[in-house]
Image (cartoon, rainbow, N blue to C red):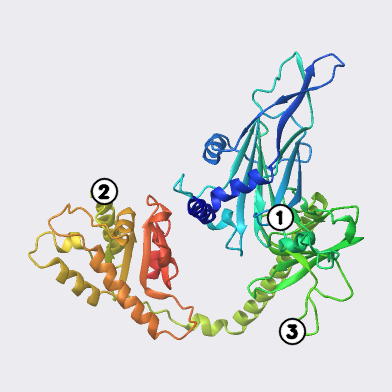
């Protein structure tokens, strides 16, 4: 019997997902999903009405995908409160860890609220949210999702609903240095807000977790760092918030240091340094441009620094850091108006400068013309006929009769308008007994330009699927593109290092009826010309 218990414990330890449920049961995860109602027009006490909390992630996700959320929630709709909850009982066999108290204070009547967790970065391999990419029961990766269903809460002319509504969940375990995104979505408001959360090492967040009951010494709070919350939902800036330090810290203020990544060097520049004086637990950075950022939050001290730059005697201050990216500018109306004004002034200045330069060039041209007018008029113009005909090989896949007909029309167009000699298998192999492969190899050696037409069929060929044979000769795309790639790679090896010159001999083209997915990503990185027909037909003629 003891062996059986031992092996069962090993089995639980090997499965991170079930063990999290065991932790949740051990620390008695608390949730709150209820609303307060009373008969309308009375002064009676509000009575609680429980709502439904869906803990099954696939069911929650399936319900979530029925809605479309098209905007972030405003402060008048949602107030998100996040705080850490340490669990430390050395007398048990459960490892000390930190849970999150997630409380949604909803200021409007809602029918449903979704709470989703998404892992952004996890250096700790024990972080099961981030490193278990496939769930055994679901056979795929699904981020945890919880649904607060308030459809059963009375909402009619006879009932008064008390707002705000508190919805709480505190069973998500958070790991040190991992970064998470919590998404909150409300129905029927159809809004969705995202909050980024991270903590330092859990023993820096809660130093008391390092203390054993048998240890009579005091807890060392000198290395404390806060839980950091980033709210990028406002349109005019970003909110930086943190969980208040314990009373034992005697902290009066914290420092928030915001860096922005500069391109293309990849270095960082300081955007702003702000101090947060307690009891305030947050500060708003206004007028933040789009880009990649790193945020540091720490207690400024005289015996440490945020940057040491190789000094062995320097000590880095305990801090909490968060990497994030803004895809859109977060500007206030005044700042946006000022930027527009500055941009207009710049454009006007550039336009005026361009007009002055143009006028100067015209004046200089007139002066030169007047001085050399006799010589210019006396010159005779000789017309020279261009007799060279470029040899162009069209390489394509026989997707269907219509597609092949379009290729033939392209060949006729180039012969008439670009004075080109077009090599096309439809013409060369229609009434001949020669080998198709030999014809393709001779064409590769003879032609001056290779025009490779990309389509749905070529994507299948690149993926290793053979095309059905529709004509009396086989599809030659695979042979043709293989020869082109060999010649292209040979020329690339002969190019000087770091050369950006485009190899004009090779062209990757497609028609606008083919989707962009037909173009393999590796082709776009080759130093070749890329065109889309029919809009780029004129460019093709000029190229040839």
Residue sticking out furthest to the left:
433
Dot 3 surroundings within 10 Å: few (below 14), some, or many (20 or more)? few
Q: Secondary structure at mark 3?
A: loop
Marks 3, 2: nearer the viewer: 3
Which residue is depicted at the point 27% across and 64% down?
395
Which of the two discs, 3 and 2, labels the residue nearer the N terminus? 3
Where is residue 226, by image quadrant? bottom right
Which residue has dot 3 on it?
A: 310
> Residue 403's spot in the image, x, y percent?
28, 51
On the question of residue 343 being in view, the answer is yes
> Residue 162's spot in the image, x, y percent?
79, 26
Judging depth in this view, the residue of 412 and 461 nearest the camera is 461
Where is residue 77, by image quadrant? top right
Above or below residue 148? Residue 358 is below
Which of the two discs, 2 and 1, labels the residue nearer the N terminus? 1
Marks 1, 3: nearer the viewer: 1
Judging depth in this view, the residue of 1 and 342 nearest the camera is 1
Which of the two discs, 1 and 3, labels the residue nearer the N terminus? 1
Q: Which mark is residue 344?
A: none
Residue at mark 3 to residue at mark 2: CA–CA distance:
67 Å
Which residue has dot 2 on it?
A: 402
Which residue has dot 1 on it?
A: 91
């Amino acid at each position: 019997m003891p062996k059986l218990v031992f092996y069962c414990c090993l089995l639980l330890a090997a499965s991170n997902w079930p063990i999290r449920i065991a932790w949740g049961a051990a620390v008695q995860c608390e949730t709150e999903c209820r609303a307060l109602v009373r008969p309308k027009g009375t002064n009676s006490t509000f009575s609680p009405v429980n709502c439904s909390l869906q803990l099954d992630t696939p069911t929650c996700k399936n319900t979530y995908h029925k809605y479309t959320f098209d905007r972030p929630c405003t402060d008048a709709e949602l107030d998100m409160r996040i705080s850490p909850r340490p669990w430390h009982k050395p007398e048990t066999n459960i490892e000390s860890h930190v849970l999150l108290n997630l409380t949604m204070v909803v200021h409007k009547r809602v029918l449903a609220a979704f709470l989703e967790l998404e892992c952004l970065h996890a250096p700790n391999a024990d972080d099961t949210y981030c490193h278990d990419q496939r769930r055994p029961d679901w056979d795929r990766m699904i981020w945890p999702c919880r649904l607060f269903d308030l459809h059963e809460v009375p909402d009619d002319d006879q009932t008064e609903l008390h707002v705000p509504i508190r919805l709480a969940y505190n069973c998500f375990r958070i790991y040190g240095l991992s970064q998470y995104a919590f998404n909150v979505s409300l129905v029927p408001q159809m809004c969705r807000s995202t909050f980024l959360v991270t903590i330092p090492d859990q023993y820096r967040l809660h130093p008391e977790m390092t203390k054993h009951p048998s240890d009579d010494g005091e807890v060392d709070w000198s290395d404390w760092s806060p839980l950091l919350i980033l709210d990028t939902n406002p349109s005019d800036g970003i909110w930086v918030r943190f969980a208040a330090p314990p009373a034992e810290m005697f902290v009066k203020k914290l420092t928030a240091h915001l860096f922005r990544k500069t391109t293309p060097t990849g270095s960082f520049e300081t955007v702003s340094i702000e101090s947060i004086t307690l009891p305030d637990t947050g500060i708003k950075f206004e007028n933040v441009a789009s880009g990649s950022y790193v945020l540091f939050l720490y207690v400024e001290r005289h015996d440490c620094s945020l940057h040491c730059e190789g000094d062995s005697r320097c000590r880095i201050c305990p801090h909490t850091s968060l990497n994030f990216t803004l895809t859109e500018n977060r500007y206030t109306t005044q700042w946006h108006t000022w930027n527009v004004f500055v941009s207009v002034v710049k454009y006007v200045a550039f336009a005026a400068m361009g007009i002055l330069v143009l006028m100067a060039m015209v004046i200089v041209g007139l002066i030169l013309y007047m001085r050399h007018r006799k010589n210019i008029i006396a010159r005779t113009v000789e017309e020279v006929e261009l007799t060279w005909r470029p040899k162009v090989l069209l390489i394509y896949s026989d997707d269907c009769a219509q597609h092949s007909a379009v290729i033939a029309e392209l060949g006729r167009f180039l012969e008439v308008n670009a004075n080109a000699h077009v090599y096309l298998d439809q013409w060369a192999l229609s009434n001949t007994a020669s080998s198709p492969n030999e014809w393709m190899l001779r064409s590769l050696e003879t032609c001056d330009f290779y025009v490779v037409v990309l389509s749905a069929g070529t994507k299948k060929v690149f993926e290793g699927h053979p095309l059905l044979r529709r004509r009396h000769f086989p599809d030659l795309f695979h042979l043709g593109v293989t020869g082109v790639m060999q010649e292209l790679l040979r020329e690339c090896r002969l190019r000087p290092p770091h050369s950006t010159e485009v190899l004009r001999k090779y062209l990757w083209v497609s028609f606008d009826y083919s989707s962009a997915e037909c173009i393999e990503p590796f082709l776009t990185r080759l130093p070749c010309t890329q065109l889309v027909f029919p809009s780029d037909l004129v460019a093709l003629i000029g190229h040839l």
